[in-house]
Image (tube, rainbow, N blue to C red):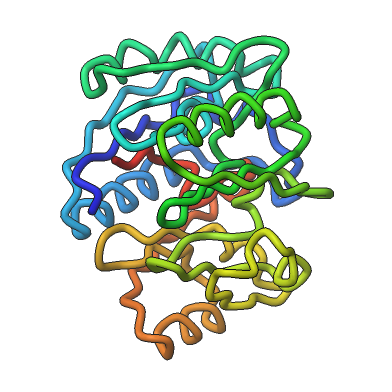
Amino acid sequence: MFEKAIVRKPSERYTEGITTSTLGVPNLEKALAQHNQYIDALKKCGVKVTVLEGNNQFPDSTFVEDEAVIVGKLVVVTRPGNPSRAGEAALITPVLENFFERMEQITSPGTLDGGDVMEVGSTFFIGLSERTNGEGAKQLKSIVEREGYHAFMIPVGTGLHLKTFMGVVGENDIVVLDRFQDRPEISGLNRLVVSPENTYACNCRRVNNNVILPAGFPAVSTMLTENGFSILEVELSEFQKMDGGISCLSLLF
């Protein structure tokens, strides 16, 4: 069960962040409203939310998931793969020190974004992507295995992060884009398969007794509901424009 979450508001420079999207420039006022709705959804799931103020030095820092990986009672501060985000590790570290006694860090030449890390039960799946290189993945794998977990690496191929294409919805259940469904690393999981037109909905997140899902994907919502999952839908159009999704906006522990 998750008890706490850390989120960071979009800053005044949010629209200047990194994106590959062609959906247009986000509306900051609307993004702030959607972020508040996301916080409300976390609270409905029974989570106590720590809300950090936006940081103008790092326009992408609202995507706090990329800055750390929680491994039980240990937190691993990452080393984001895009150079413009390099300072975010130092930004989040003093915040994490308020919650965790044990802390480690991904070090050079390793790079790792938290969006490439998916935890299902006692197993961590680590995506190899443009943001997470082999050395960063190897460092995290060593840490999680030392802590008693299993770890597998999965090549992401074309796309931003592993969790762009799959998301945890149950104890052993994931939503997964069709082209990843036969990956041997996830063969032991119950896979709820999503078609390409619903790719954005793959980035969803189980939070205690609910699954938080981006609004606007009725086929995925129906599939989850028919499989017994309780859904909370949140509109995230202004975050989709910046390649951000449900999991990207919080650190849960």
How many marks can you see? 0
In this view of the protein, which residue sits in the foreground, 27 or 42? 42
Report the residue that reaches farthest toward the bottom: 226
Residue 63 higher or lower than 83, as above or below: below
Residue 232 placement (x, y as % from top left): 33, 68
Residue 201 higher or lower than 68, as above or below: below
Tell me if 181 is positioned left or right of 100 in this view. right
In this view of the protein, which residue sits in the foreground, 69 or 207? 69
Give the quadrant of residue 243: top right
Residue 101 higher or lower than 34, as above or below: above
Tell me if 108 is positioned left or right of 140 in this view. right
Quarter holding the C terminus is: top left
* Residue visible at 47% across and 20% down in the picture: 77
Give the quadrant of residue 70: top left
Quarter holding the N terminus is: bottom left
* Residue visible at 39% across and 23% down in the picture: 54
Residue 231 placement (x, y as % from top left): 35, 73
Residue 40 placement (x, y as % from top left): 24, 52
Tell me if 41 is positioned left or right of 155 in this view. left
* Residue visible at 57% across and 18% down in the picture: 106
* Residue visible at 38% across and 13% down in the picture: 93
Report the residue that reaches farthest toward the right: 158
Residue 161 placement (x, y as % from top left): 67, 44
